[in-house]
């Protein structure tokens, strides 16, 4: 078995790994559910390589993510539901359908994507999925009224899902017009959190804290900020400043374990002041 630039080789490798007789025991025992966390992890590692602008790592991480797609497709093929070719066909069909201004006839290509067309295309896709589920007998059979928010994936990271839920609701007018009222909402949520903290009720504290985070995501959306990106930058800034604390304490012959909060806080404030533009 030799490496190759051909996707068929990767599919062949996965088939070998999943062979019940001669494959890898770990790969053979995996299921969609056990592999799903790895799929999410690999997507984050791709994002991390991009954030670090590391093209060498990015090649490797994209390969790991592609392997996840092949892994899921192989398990589906074994179950007789679909194969890797079906995955490729599905995404190529979707891309062609979603870009009529690129792949349509001359008349359509001469125009930009008309306002509202994107929503119509996605609505058509959703109707097709519903019909496919019914035909396959995999519809949930629920008698509950369908919601506009039903297809926002529950497995998304919480910040990302909050943003998508808010955007979906905003599309039908359930939204503030400007950012200032959201600041008032944040103050309200902060006060409610303070109240339940005094009551020392863990369930209420978690609920109010969640409401505050949700309101913060909404504020970011109205400020045209990506909450995940903003928090990523804040994480990096915290890590950078904390490292400066460690370095300064080391230069003094001390450490974070030996220093008290007042000493570390003084260094933090000095680092923060030094980072501010003149």
Image (tube, rainbow, N blue to C red):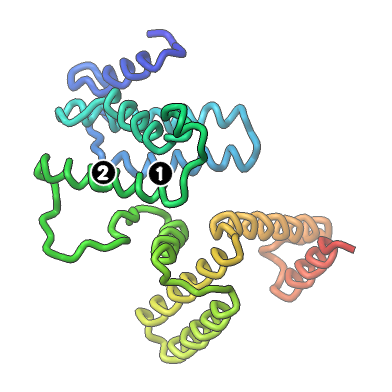
Which residue lies under the disc numbered 1? 40
Residue 149 placement (x, y as % from top left): 32, 61
Q: Quadrant of residue 90?
A: top left
Q: Secondary structure at mark 2?
A: helix
Q: Secondary structure at mark 1?
A: helix
Horizontal side, residue 122 vs residue 163: left or right: left
Q: Residue furthest front?
A: 107
Q: Quadrant of residue 87?
A: top left
Q: Is residue 30 above or below residue 277?
A: above
Nearest the eye: 7 or 275: 7
Q: Label 2 crowding class (10 Å Cα cut-off): few <14, some 14-19, many 20+? A: few
The residue shown at (49%, 82%) is 189
Q: Is residue 244 above or below residue 207?
A: above
Which residue lies under the disc numbered 2? 33
The residue shown at (39%, 53%) is 156
Real-space Cα separation, disc 1 to disc 2, in angstroms: 12 Å
Q: Is residue 195 above or below residue 129?
A: below
Horizontal side, residue 255 vs residue 145: left or right: right
Horizontal side, residue 246 vs residue 181: left or right: right
Residue 58 placement (x, y as % from top left): 56, 31
| Residue contact between numbered discs 1 and 2, judged by CB atoms under 8 Å | no
The residue shown at (44%, 36%) is 99
Horizontal side, residue 183 vs residue 109: left or right: right
The residue shown at (43%, 73%) is 210
Nearest the eye: 189 or 28: 189
Q: Quadrant of residue 243?
A: bottom right
Residue 232 placement (x, y as % from top left): 59, 55
Q: Label 1 crowding class (10 Å Cα cut-off): few <14, some 14-19, many 20+? A: some
Quadrant placement of the C terminus: bottom right
């Amino acid at each position: 078995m030799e490496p190759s630039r051909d996707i068929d080789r990767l599919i062949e490798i996965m088939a070998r790994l999943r062979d019940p007789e001669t494959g890898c025991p770990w790969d053979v025992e995996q299921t969609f559910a056990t592999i799903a966390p790895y799929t999410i992890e690999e997507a984050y590692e791709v994002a991390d390589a991009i954030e670090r602008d590391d093209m060498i790592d990015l090649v490797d991480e994209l390969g790991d993510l592609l392997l996840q797609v092949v892994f899921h497709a192989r398990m589906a093929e074994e179950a007789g539901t679909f194969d890797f070719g079906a995955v490729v066909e599905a995404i190529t069909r979707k891309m062609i359908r979603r870009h009529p201004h690129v792949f349509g006839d001359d008349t359509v290509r001469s125009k930009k994507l008309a306002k509202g067309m994107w929503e119509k295309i996605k609505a058509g896709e959703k109707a097709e999925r519903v019909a496919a589920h019914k035909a396959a007998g995999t519809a949930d059979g629920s008698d509950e009224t369908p919601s506009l928010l039903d297809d926002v994936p529950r497995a998304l990271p919480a910040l990302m899902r909050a943003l998508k839920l808010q955007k979906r609701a905003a599309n039908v007018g359930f939204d503030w017009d400007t950012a200032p009222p959201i600041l008032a909402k944040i103050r309200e949520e902060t006060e409610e959190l303070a109240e339940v903290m005094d009551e020392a009720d863990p369930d209420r504290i978690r609920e109010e804290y969640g409401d505050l985070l949700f309101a913060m995501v909404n504020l970011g959306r109205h400020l045209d900020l990506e909450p995940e990106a903003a928090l990523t930058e804040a994480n990096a800034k915290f890590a950078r400043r904390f490292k400066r604390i460690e370095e300064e304490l080391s230069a003094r012959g001390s450490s974070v374990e030996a220093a008290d909060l007042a000493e570390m806080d003084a260094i933090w404030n000095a680092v923060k002041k030094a980072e501010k533009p003149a």
